[in-house]
Amino acid sequence: MPDDLSAILEPGMFVRAPDRPDWGLGQVQSNVGGKVTVNFENEGKLVLDARNVALVLAFLD
């Protein structure tokens, strides 16, 4: 698996930022060249560089 998820993140996937648990669950909106737009439940929409911000996949029950 790559060091960052930018290669596999697609719109609709759910992620969390382990370094920022206060952001809550996020849904990927877009991924263009490693710049990932994520809409977090507690922080809103953010554009993140997936090479610099840790994101982990979240699986819903």
Image (cartoon, helix red, strand yellow):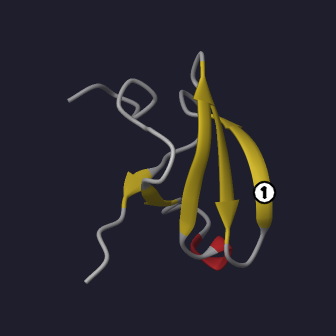
Instruction: Say which residue appears at 62% left-offset and 66% top-offset.
Output: 20
Instruction: Say which residue appears at 45% left-offset and 38% top-offset.
Output: 10
Q: Is residue 3 above or below residue 10?
A: above
Classify mark 1: residues with Cα within 10 Å, few (<14), some (14-19) or many (20+).
some
Q: Residue 59 location in percent, x, y?
A: 29, 69
Considering every residue shown, the one lying at the far top of the view is: 33
Under tag 1, what secondary structure?
Answer: strand
Amino acid at pointer 1 = Lys
Quadrant (top left, top right, bottom left, bottom right) of the N terminus? top left
Q: Residue 37 location in percent, x, y?
A: 68, 42
Q: Is residue 57 above or below residue 5?
A: below
Q: Residue 45 location in percent, x, y?
A: 78, 57
Left or right: 19 with respect to 22? left
Left or right: 55 with respect to 28? left
Q: Quadrant of the rendered structure where residue 22 is?
A: bottom right
Q: Is residue 9 above or below residue 39?
A: above
Instruction: Say which residue appears at 35% left-offset and 65% top-offset.
Output: 58
Instruction: Say which residue appears at 42% left-offset and 53% top-offset.
Output: 13
Considering every residue shown, the one lying at the far left of the view is: 1
Q: Mark 1 sits on what residue? A: 45
Q: Residue 25 location in percent, x, y?
A: 54, 72
Quadrant (top left, top right, bottom left, bottom right) of the C terminus? bottom left
